[in-house]
Image (cartoon, rainbow, N blue to C red):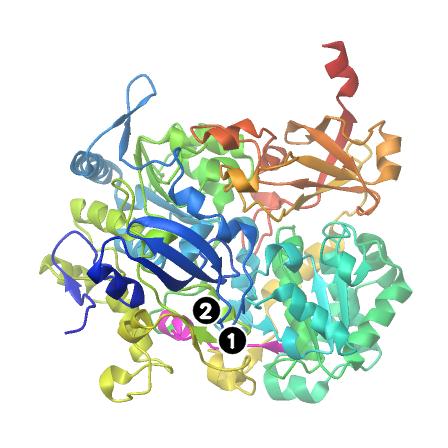
Amino acid sequence: MSTQVLYETQGEIAHPQSGPMASSNTGSAEATVTRKIFCGVCEGSCGLEATVRGSELLSLRPDPDHPNTRGFACSKGLAFGAVRDDPDRLLHPLKRQADGSFARVSWDQALDEIGERLRAIIARHGTESIGLYQGNSVAWNFGAFLNLFGMAGALKTKHLYSAASIDINGYWVISELLYGSNFLNPIPDVARTDFMLCIGANPAVSHGSMANIGRFRDTMMAVTQRGGRVVVVDPRRSETASLFEHVPIRPNGDVWLLAALLKVIFDEGLADLEALREQTAGHEILPQLLAPLDLSAASAAAGIPVEQIRQLARDFAAAPSACAYGRCGMSIGPFASLGKYFLDVLNIATGNLDRPGGWCFGRPFIDLETMMHRMKSTGYDRWRTRVDDFPEVAGTSPVVSIPREIRTPGKGQMRAMLVIGANPASSSPAAGELCAAFSELDLLISQDVYMTETSRLAHYILPPTVWLEREGFPIFTQSHAGVPHAQWVGPTVPARGEARDDAWIMDEISRRIGIVPADFPGAQLLGKLGLRASPSFLMDVGLRTGPEGDWFGLRPSGLSRKKLMERNGAVKLADGVPVGVLKKRIFTKGGKVQLDHALIRKEMTRMLAFDTAVSAEYPLSLISLRELRSQNTWLHNIPKLIVGDRVQRLRIHPIDAARYGIEDGDPVEITSRDGQISVPAARVTDEMMPGSVALPHGWGHTGGWQRAVAVGGSGYNALTTNRADSTDLPSGNATVNGIAVRVRSLKSFEAAA
């Protein structure tokens, strides 16, 4: 009999142990076994080998047989066992006491009290007063992802928030406009390209985002080794830029550069008009859209000479194959959506869409794009937010609005929030204001493994399992893999303490307020009959009826959840991303990319009127910085990742350091229009473009994770704002890059003290 659970009438969602690890443990509870899994820390989703004895995780090492990552994994994933076994990890439900302390309670007490309080809030304010917030970790937790969106749909609340509106919402907007689905995102075919233009990304450290290119650094190096070019555009000579041709750019100058490249391509007749006619609709708007752009103005805004822009455009258009790829550096500024539009159009207009070495669609083993499109789970501007009038993006509202949604009276005012796998009290813009607003909620629930800056504000903290302790497949990154593959694994080790799967927690809360955490037709009726479809069942149906599925036995060579969980390792589906699939993959009318949108024309007008002048009061431009051994606001509690001289440092160019009296190693103060922080040390380095400074984000911890608190530092987001007019207006994405600041050394003040 199949091990999958079709429908559940009990509380626990089943996670069957299957495959070699389970069978090896049958004979002896203490047998040492090795199982091939994948990492759930970042978008690399690297293949790992886990060696386990009983409930003990002995080691994690790279999987040499993984088709995409081929024996690579970074220090973060290899050290993750320390999170699972961390003595600071929360292992039991906690309830806030009257004095602000927390006391251990049973699951039944916590869930029953949460249910009672939520029912009272709903009775008084309606289901639309309940909020939900998902963090980046949910991207590797398919059960939590499905139940979270399902809860929001069942509650009919607009208060669904995601960390995506801090760093990527503009991608979702443009994908919906161009391709007909928020989550249909082309990726660069780096393995076959002749010219890669990398804008605002540092894959040598991040290992890629929105592009799961296995061994990303090595794959980029191979481009130059075979005679191609890689050009990296970044205000900082990053770890990636130091390996290739580096073009320094002013922070937030990306949108100007991309527009200028396109203007040169159209003005000089370099566009592939045949490809535009064949693949797109509305391409006639492009020359009109770009006509008002002055190259000198674009050059000044980007900090790149006009002739260098012209030559870069010519070289990109002339390359036998080319791909332009951009990430956080260009997606967290005031024109993130417009920049992403120009990035895609640069690939499309040069004939590089859906061709080898160009801008291609991945081959997911579970076709979530089609599933979500058919269920009408994706979309844009189908409704507007209550206070700030932002358009919804894939059913979510932007994080910047949370404090105003909590504090603004009226129908739909948010009165309760459930936070899953996130730390918005640290990671959100204007984090201090969000913390204050959280304290005004009638109920705040945090599902987290640590006592973080967010969970310490909660009324209840519910301990979830970590990815090593739950069933999983790479739900998010499977669509972006450079080498398409399929993998589905059971729990590697048992859960510690009383930790429970996030999906189980949400399902139990949902039961207590009388809903099923699902938004497909008939879900609530089935729930009343005692039938609740598990996330595993739903995803298995999607897999088995999809292009790679076994169609419930009608296609014996196809895949199913059971087959994948019984296999020790990933299944390779192809050597590389497919091409010639455009009409099969996109969801627009006529199967063509839609380029003409009033929203884009409006944003172009806004960009041309935008003031890019340097402020006299705040003359430096601050960008965030990703470090190799950090991951957003967590992992600072892992000893191996904090060894050595690990402190938060502000990178600053020698010219700027001399101008403001800063020496290498000085503690510094950073001030913006919206906040002020102190940083332990400055690093004076010519890797920075003069006029710009860079600060690692995710530092400055409080709460109960002792090592993270002890390493010190300050929160980057204290310098940012959540004003509605400061965002990328089409998407509501926060602007957290290119922040105008001033700096000064604190060395003399510390000496005096």
Specify start and end residues of the magenta stretch as a single range.
358-372
- Relative to residue 72, is residue 59 depicted above or below? above
- Along the line of sight, which residue is nearer the eye, 57 or 662? 57
- Relative to residue 258, is residue 134 depicted above or below? above
Mark 2 neighbour density, 10 Å: few (under 14) some (14–19) many (20 or more):
many
Q: Are marks 2 and 1 in contact (CB under 8 Å)?
A: yes
Asked if residue 151 lies left or right of residue 49, the reply is left
Q: Is residue 641 visible?
A: yes
Task: Point out the tag, 2 or 1, that comes first from the N-terminus.
Answer: 1
Residue 47's x, y, as percent?
47, 64
Q: What residue is pinned by disc 2?
A: 478
In the image as oriented, which residue stretches furthest toward the left? 529
73 magenta-colored = no
Asked if residue 524 lies left or right of residue 681, the reply is left
- Along the line of sight, which residue is nearer the eye, 278 or 288? 278
- Mark identifier at residue 362: 1
Assign the C terminus to one quadrant of the image.
top right
Residue at mark 2 to residue at mark 1: CA–CA distance: 8 Å
Residue 517's x, y, as percent?
25, 55
Residue at x-position 34% and y-position 60%? 33
365 magenta-colored = yes
Residue 236's x, y, as percent?
76, 50
